[in-house]
Amino acid sequence: MAQTNMSRANTDTSSKDNVPPPSEEGAGEICPVCKGAGVVHPALDSGKVDFSRVVPCRCSKGELRKKKTEYLEKYSNLGSLSQLTFDNLSPKGKVASAISQERFTQVHQAARAFADNPRGWLVFLGPSGSGKTHLACAVADHRLKLGEPVFYITAADLLDHLRSAFSPSSNTTYDELFEQVKNVPLLVLDDLTLGSATAWAKEKLEQLLHHRFNARLATVITTDVPLERMDERLRGHLTDSEFCQIWTIEQESPLESQSGLKLELLRNMTFDNFDHKRMELPPEQRQNLRQAYNLAVEFARSPEGWLIFQGINGCGKTHLAAAIANYRLARGKPALFVVVPDLLDHLRSTFSPDSKISYDEFSEKLKETPLLILDDFGEQSATPWAQGKLYQLINHRYNARLPMVVTTCLSLDEIETRISSRMVDPMISLVFNITAPDYRGNVKPVRQAKRY
């Protein structure tokens, strides 16, 4: 080996930096420190030279760092997805609503914290296009910039590679590939789904995740499968709150983007600006309005069963219904507010070839949303098709005992019997008739809806 310089200033153990790095001019010249060897013997704290080992010379560190970066980038399997970084990801996400932006900001902060110090599992749940893959790749990109290993792969590609590894022409054996994915310090597993997977595919994915869970290896997972629909074994791992962070990213659906709460007037309808005192009203009507207000506040805090508000236009029932929705959304809880005539128009539009959502997806969203608010029920055109669709929706939520708020100008006698019979069921529904007149000043005789 060529004679090497044993100066402490040129070793990794040095605390001083008295020897300048070799000049980049005349890059072909031999380094005067290591004489071209690329390594030096390090100095001990005592000042003596440790001839038992070598460390990279300062002249080679830049090249080694470059090679390490190139290796890690190739190893990461990110490819073109390396362009998905925190720098080009909006901390507020893609959705326009302030509540959704605030929620995405929290997810964004959690992803950045995890990228700085990967511990446990970070799971992003959400529909396609919600930003979960960008977040996952941004975490991977951040680790690469820190010089740390990470491996990215979609669940489908992983299974394809594992299958192809059995081929005699494969450059990688099955065991080598699977061990790499099982034991990499940070794995990003994108688009995980087990629903339609074969028994073999499920076994391999479960084997992989079970190993990483038991070994406490950092993992980022993205999936569009709701937690309650996941495989029981995987769900058991994810519910370990000390090891797993689960963040749900919601994307504004075509249904939500057209909901009434997109209107500024309705977004501003809150409990704080609802005038339930209305001193110009007779005492009975003031008391009635206050009872409606208290019912709405109580329901908003803990939505259970159905709350049906009856009354003339302008009595305040839509304001209270919108206030319930805004209250829930402000606390990060789901609530879907729709005006019934608009709802039916949207349902019809799903049959168009240009529709961004299918009828089944649209209908399922309505049926299963945790809290549904139907405004202006009875104002829709009473065609057999419309009545049938509304009955299907209400009957499903009735049987599933899912919370719902309904506002209507009709008395229950004027509503189709098979729907009104469910609305009057005291086991699930509370019907309240608001007797206050139109608050906009167009005071007319109040049509008294029957109390049940």
Image: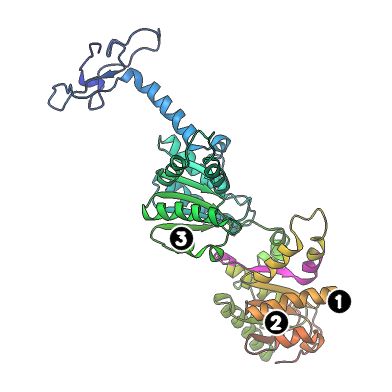
Q: Magenta stretch?
A: 329-345
What residue is at 78 percent from the left and 73 percent from the top? Answer: 389
Q: From the viewer's perspective, tell me whether residue 349 is left or right of residue 323.
A: right
- Camera sees residue 214: yes
Q: Nearer the viewer, residue 209 or 118?
A: 209
Residue closer to the observer: 227 or 13: 227
Say few, some or many: other residues with alpha carbon within 10 Å of mark 1 (under 14 / 14 to 19 / 20 or more).
few
Q: Amino acid at mark 2?
A: Phe
Name the residue carrying label 1.
384
Q: Is residue 195 magenta?
A: no
Q: Secondary structure at mark 1?
A: helix
Closer mark to the observer between disc 3 and disc 1? 3
Q: Position of residue 344 (x, y in %)?
A: 80, 68
Dot 2: element? strand
Q: Give the amino acid at mark 1.
A: Pro
Q: CA distance from mark 2 to mark 1?
A: 25 Å
Q: Can residue 379 be seen?
A: no
Mark number displayed over residue 309? 2
The N terminus is located in which quarter?
Answer: top left
Picture coordinates of residue 452 (x, y %)? 70, 92
